[in-house]
């Protein structure tokens, strides 16, 4: 399989992560379910940073995050810096994460998601005066619970397209 197709698969997964993050729930769904939405881009960027650290560059992750800022309406640079930090964590812990148990992986993803959500809440508080809410912990828990299924799906995609 060509390198171009492999790169397009990784890019497609990043774009799908962006679309799922930006997408809105139907109006018939209660508002509290929206609080349970995970940080999809954190999960996708962390997966690819652990699996193919030499292929996913810091600039590409930063650009994806900046595009997320534009799509979501956050302060420019917020998601870029957060996703770059997540990817850097994945690169540094790549050998260890492969040896972690699923519980340890979920705990690591929880810590990263909580850090990302706290940084976003802090920036939102400083720029817009939005008060902190305890829902960031709920959101971090939901993000960490999605790690195992999403890593399984992306692992199958990686294997079927022979991405290395």
Image: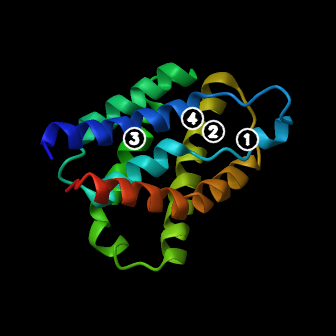
Comparing labels 2 and 4, the label whose residue is closer to the camera: 4
**Residue under circle 3?**
13
In this rendering, is residue 85 above or below 30? Answer: below
At horizontal 38% and vertical 60% (from top left) the residue drawn is 155
Q: Dots 4 and 1: beta carbons under 8 Å?
A: no
Image-quadrant location for residue 117: top right
Query: Sequence order check: which comes first, mark 4 or mark 3?
Result: 3
What's the CA distance linking mark 2 and mark 3? 26 Å
**Residue under circle 1?**
132
**Residue under circle 2?**
121
Checking the image for residue 31, the label placed there is none
Q: Dots 2 and 4: beta carbons under 8 Å?
A: no
Residue 80 is situated, as x and y percent measured from the top left of the image, at 40, 34
**Residue under circle 4?**
21
Query: Sequence order check: which comes first, mark 2 or mark 4?
Result: 4
Comparing labels 2 and 3, the label whose residue is closer to the camera: 3
Q: Nearer the viewer, residue 45 or 120?
A: 45
Residue 2 is situated, as x and y percent measured from the top left of the image, at 13, 42
Query: Sequence order check: which comes first, mark 2 or mark 3?
Result: 3
Asked which secondary structure carries label 4, the reply is: helix
Q: Dots 4 and 3: beta carbons under 8 Å?
A: no
Is residue 139 toward the left or the right of residue 8 in the image? right
What's the CA distance linking mark 4 and mark 1? 21 Å
What's the CA distance linking mark 4 and mark 3? 12 Å
Asked which secondary structure carries label 2, the reply is: helix
Q: Which of 22 and 108 is in front in this view?
A: 22
In this rendering, is residue 83 above or below 114? Answer: above
At horizontal 31% and vertical 42% (from top left) the residue drawn is 10
């Amino acid at each position: 399989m060509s390198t171009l197709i492999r790169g397009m698969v990784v890019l497609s997964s990043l774009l799908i992560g962006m679309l799922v993050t930006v997408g809105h729930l139907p109006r018939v769904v209660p508002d509290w379910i929206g609080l349970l939405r995970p940080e999809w881009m954190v999960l996708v960027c962390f997966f690819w940073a652990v699996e193919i650290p030499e292929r996913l560059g810091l600039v590409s992750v930063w650009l994806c995050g900046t595009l997320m800022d534009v799509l979501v309406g956050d302060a420019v640079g917020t998601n870029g810096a957060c996703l770059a930090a997540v990817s850097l964590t994945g690169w540094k812990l790549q050998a260890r994460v492969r040896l972690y148990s699923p519980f340890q992986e979920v705990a690591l993803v929880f810590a990263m998601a909580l850090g990302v959500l706290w940084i976003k809440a802090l920036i939102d508080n400083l720029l817009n005066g939005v008060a902190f809410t305890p829902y960031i912990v709920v959101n971090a828990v939901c993000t960490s619970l999605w790690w195992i299924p999403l890593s399984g799906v992306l692992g199958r995609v990686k294997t079927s397209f022979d991405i290395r």
